[in-house]
Amino acid sequence: MQQGRRDPAGTQAVRRGEPVILWADTFSNHFRPEAALAAVQVLEAAGCRVSLPQARLCCGRPLYDFGLLDQARSALGRILDVLGAQIMAGVPVIGLEPSCVAVFRDELGKLFPDDERAARLAAQTHTLAEYLDRSGWLPSAPADGKVRRALLHGHCHQKALMGMQAELKMLKAAGYAVDAPDAGCCGMAGSFGFKPEHYEASQKIGEMVLLPSVRAAAADTVIVANGFSCREQIEQGAGRRTLHLAEVLARDLPLPAASR
């Protein structure tokens, strides 16, 4: 991890403020690293000291979804062991993939009901937008006052457990007029839509609201989706590039520092 970030003048930016752990999920590590890199930029611009887990860890979501509870519990137990000291010290964990955040906020406590580390990790895990909102940090709208347009789609786990209000707040503060279609599920639903036997059903679900809405959006509308499966469904089904919220906010760096 880089120990600082160069500002536009070329001097070394000093990282201060609250330490945070950026959860390096499988999708960010292997498929969409640009989202994680953007998140580091945004968090450092907000005054955070960002670190990554010092081991390759997995939240166990695929294992849990397929009923492999013993393996999922083992994966989560390793997380508690590796991050235990930071968890007990109260360090927030910032997740970029909603399905991973949902594991920590929901399933983790059910698999480790008597482990204080699990309870603390559940309470200390936030989406990027939630954390920024909690810290009181907001991006700035364009200086020219020009309104930009964004279409926001929420991952099912996020809509069910965390909500999308923090995302809407960040985008509006950044000068975006936001359309958030009531699309329900994108249809991909993790690995569901990748399976040949489910492909037709997956496409039908996407075509109910989401994919037509994306196709109808103006060419300059930014398509925002945090979930990996949602982004795949949109890009493959509607032919439009998607961005994680972190990438949208990082576009306008340097951003104003958080209040200290």
Image (cartoon, rainbow, N blue to C red):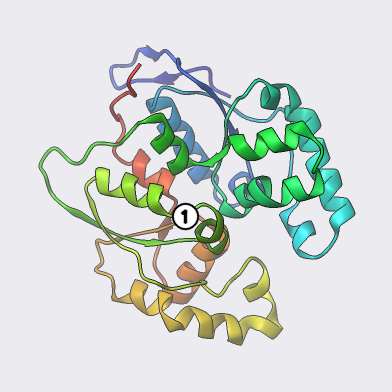
From what the image shows, is residue 91 above or below residue 149? Answer: above
Q: Is residue 208 left or right of residue 104?
A: left
Instruction: Decide: is 169 above or below 93.
Output: below
Q: Secondary structure at mark 1?
A: loop
Residue in view at x 41 percent, y 79 percent:
209
Q: Quadrant location of residue 62?
A: bottom right
Image x and y of residue 178, in percent? 28, 59
Residue 187 x, y percent position in the rendering:
55, 75
Residue in the image at 48% along x and 32% along y: 40
Q: Is residue 68 left or right of residue 38?
A: right
The quarter of the picture where the N terminus appears is top right
In x, y percent, where is residue 177? 23, 57
Q: Nearer the viewer, residue 138 or 191?
A: 138
Say which amino acid is labelled 1: Gly
Q: Is residue 8 left or right of residue 106?
A: left
Horizontal side of 16 relative to 64 (left or right) equals left
Q: Residue furthest left?
A: 144
Q: Residues within 10 Å of mark 1 (few under 14, many from 20)?
A: some
Residue beneath disc 1: 163
Confirm whether residue 23 shows in the render: no
Which of the pair 9/182 is nearer the observer? 182
Q: Residue at x 45, y 82 (%)?
A: 207
- Identity of the residue drawn at 52% across and 72% down: 185
Residue 131 visible in the snapshot? yes
